Image (tube, grey):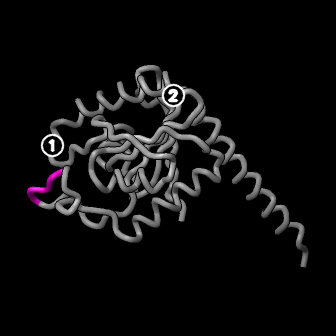
Amino acid sequence: MNIRPLLALAAGLFVSAFALASDLSEKLQSNDHVLLMRHTLAPGVGDPARYQLADCKTQRNLSAEGRQQALNVGHWLRKQGIAQAAVFSSAWCRCKDTAELLNFKGYQVEPALASFFDEMHQAKARTRDLERFIAAKLATKGRQALILVTHHVNIFEFMGENIGSGDMVLAKVNAQGKTLTYQIIPRPD
């Protein structure tokens, strides 16, 4: 049995993984890339009737699996070379918990990341708010990564594709925060 093809394949995979890590870290240190993340697994759709943002018990929340997924994503991001990040979250508890579990020295709640699932007529206005927020933060963040934890509807409206729980989107944006190109990054297990 010739082991050389297997060694070549393994070396290629290692180089590819190293290139992704280096590429992701470099792009997130620039002032034209942002990482959007859908909150990790919170079983169900939407929120129960009469939920309240100030009361997590009334909302759809992360499952134990979702909590572990968030920890795994944070660990994976650090393995990609992302040592410092400004993390912002929607006010929904499932997003705040995801942001906290990434373990990047806290997070801040940002209204531009709020879900409009129950108010789809707000989609365009909320997306404009998100673009303005991204533009402002990228201009002042320095070399730290900008990570935004939000909802399916927000990401879909921002870039036009569905992503799964815990998946990420590396978006290159213009000076106004509008998407130019993007890469979907599946949630690491």
Q: Is residue 134 visible?
A: yes
Foreground pick, 155 / 65: 65
Circle 2 packing at 10 Å, graded few (<14), some (14-19), many (20+), is some
- Please name the amino acid that badge 1 sits on: Glu
Question: Could you tell me residue 147's position as x and y percent?
Answer: 47, 41
Residue 140 rendering spot, x and y as whole percentages: 49, 23
How far across and down, in percent of the image, does residue 127 sit?
29, 33
Nearer to me, 153 or 150: 150
Identify the residue shown where x is 64% and y is 53%.
79
Residue at image coords 63%, 41%: 25
Residue designated by label 1: 119
Of tags 2 and 1, the one toward the viewer is 2
Image location of residue 87, percent across then percent down: 45, 41
Q: Is residue 156 among the parts visible in the rendering?
A: no
User: Which residue is found at the position 18% from the left and 42% from the top?
Assistant: 120
- Taking the magenta stretch, the answer to whether it contains residue 189 is no
Q: Tag count in the figure?
A: 2
Q: Is residue 154 above or below residue 177?
A: below
Element marked by disc 2: loop
Left or right side of 22 for 65? left
**Outermost residue toward the bottom?**
1
Secondary structure mainly formed by the magenta segment: loop
Disc 1 element: loop
Determine which quarter of the picture holds residue 107: top left
Q: Residue at x 65, y 36 (%)?
A: 26
User: Mark on residue 141?
Assistant: 2
The region drawn magenta spans 49-53
For the residue marked with disc 2, what is the amino acid? Lys
Q: CA distance from mark 2 to mark 1?
A: 31 Å
Q: Is residue 171 above or below residue 94?
A: above
Query: Going by the image, does 139 lie left or right of 44?
Result: right
Relative height, residue 44 to residue 77 (above, below): below
